[in-house]
Amino acid sequence: MTEDMKRKIDSVLERVKEPETFRSVAELGLVGKVSYSESEKKLLVVLDIEEPRHPCFVCGVVTATIRRSLMRDLKTEFEKEFPSLTVEVF
């Protein structure tokens, strides 16, 4: 992975905000891993969001909603930054 690509990845992670706090996913450590396959022209982005500690239905719904929102926003921003690559977020 080139330094330019690393810089662009860091830029995306700074731009995407967690919807409740409006802090970047980079600042909050919500992305566990970003992998690049040059042969497949693919970026894989792995979120690092744990399930709620308590068996609270509402907490689970909120966490799932935030996760879906971040997955959508990360995919959108990575596709803008790397239009020639396939982006998968999970």
Image: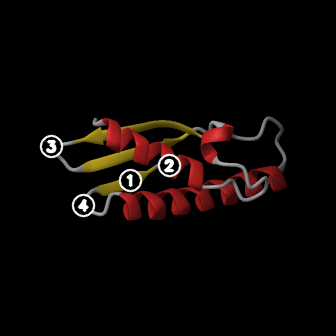
Real-space Cα separation, disc 3 to disc 4, in angstroms: 13 Å
Q: Residue at x 39, y 39 (%)?
A: 6
Real-space Cα separation, disc 1 to disc 2, in angstroms: 18 Å
Q: Label 3 amino acid?
A: Ser
The residue indicated by pointer 1 is 88
Q: Position of residue 87 (x, y in %)?
A: 35, 55
Q: Residue at x 27, y 56 (%)?
A: 85
Q: Position of residue 89 (x, y in %)?
A: 45, 51
Disc 2 or 4, which lies upstream in sequence? 2
- Tag nearer the camera, 2 or 3: 2
Q: Are marks 3 and 4 in contact (CB under 8 Å)?
A: no
Q: Label 4 amino acid?
A: Ser
Residue at disc 4, secondary structure: loop
Give the crowd class for mark 1: few <14, some 14-19, many >=20 residues within 10 Å. Answer: some
The residue indicated by pointer 3 is 39
- Asked which quadrant contains residue 75, the reply is bottom left
- Tag nearer the camera, 3 or 1: 3
Disc 3 or 1, which lies upstream in sequence? 3
Nearer to me, 88 or 36: 36
Q: Are marks 2 and 4 in contact (CB under 8 Å)?
A: no
Real-space Cα separation, disc 2 to disc 3, in angstroms: 23 Å
Q: Position of residue 9 (x, y in %)?
A: 43, 45
The residue indicated by pointer 4 is 84
In-image side of 35 versus 70 (left or right):
left
Q: Label 1 amino acid?
A: Glu
- Tag nearer the camera, 1 or 2: 2
In the current view of this chain or complex, which residue is farthest to the left?
A: 39
Nearer to me, 15 or 45: 15
The residue indicated by pointer 2 is 11
